[in-house]
Image (tube, helix red, strand yellow):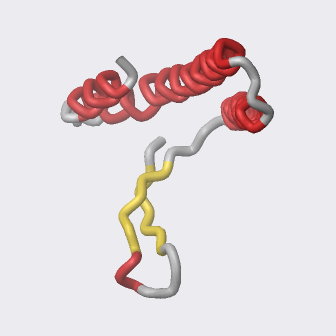
Amino acid sequence: METTEHACAGTNSETCAHMKQTPRSEELRHDVTCRINRAIGQLNGVKAMVEEDRYCGDVLTQLAAVESAVKAVSREIMQDHLETCVVERIQAGDTEVVDEVMRLFKKFM
């Protein structure tokens, strides 16, 4: 499932970076894209609230909604990662992926 490619940002070869790519189902891409667009819309709403000097409690409530939306996207991507990339790497004998997963879990705690 996981493939590796080289990607270059710009014309200078010194800006090339090593990048992994993971094919995702069309359904997952669509769902994640919709969730991200919704979170972006919520953030734009929060920005407008701040610009309009809206009540702090209302702004904080909307920020909590944005945070919840982003966490939902993270959980969905994490589940897909565990079910695809991690399983495949462990089946291939690469148990170092467990350390990677633990580092990822720590970022979300």
Q: Position of residue 75 (x, y in %)?
A: 52, 20
Closest to the observer, 82 or 15: 15
Taking the image as shown, residue 16 lies to the left or right of residue 70, namely left
Residue at the (34%, 29%) spot, across then down: 104
The count of marks equals: 0
Residue at the (31%, 27%) spot, across then down: 101
Residue 7 lies, with reference to residue 84, above or below; the image says below
Closest to the observer, 13 or 56: 56
Quadrant of the rendering where the C terminus is positioned: top left
Taking the image as shown, residue 15 lies to the left or right of residue 24, namely left
Q: Check the image and name the residue furthest to the bottom.
A: 12
Taking the image as shown, residue 65 lies to the left or right of residue 30, namely left
Closest to the observer, 68 or 60: 60
Q: Quadrant of residue 64?
A: top right
Residue at the (80%, 33%) spot, across then down: 52
Q: Position of residue 3 (x, y in %)?
A: 44, 52
Q: Quadrant of residue 90?
A: top left
Taking the image as shown, residue 68 lies to the left or right of residue 41, namely left
Q: Position of residue 47 (x, y in %)?
A: 72, 36
Residue at the (68%, 21%) spot, across then down: 59
Closest to the observer, 43 or 32: 43
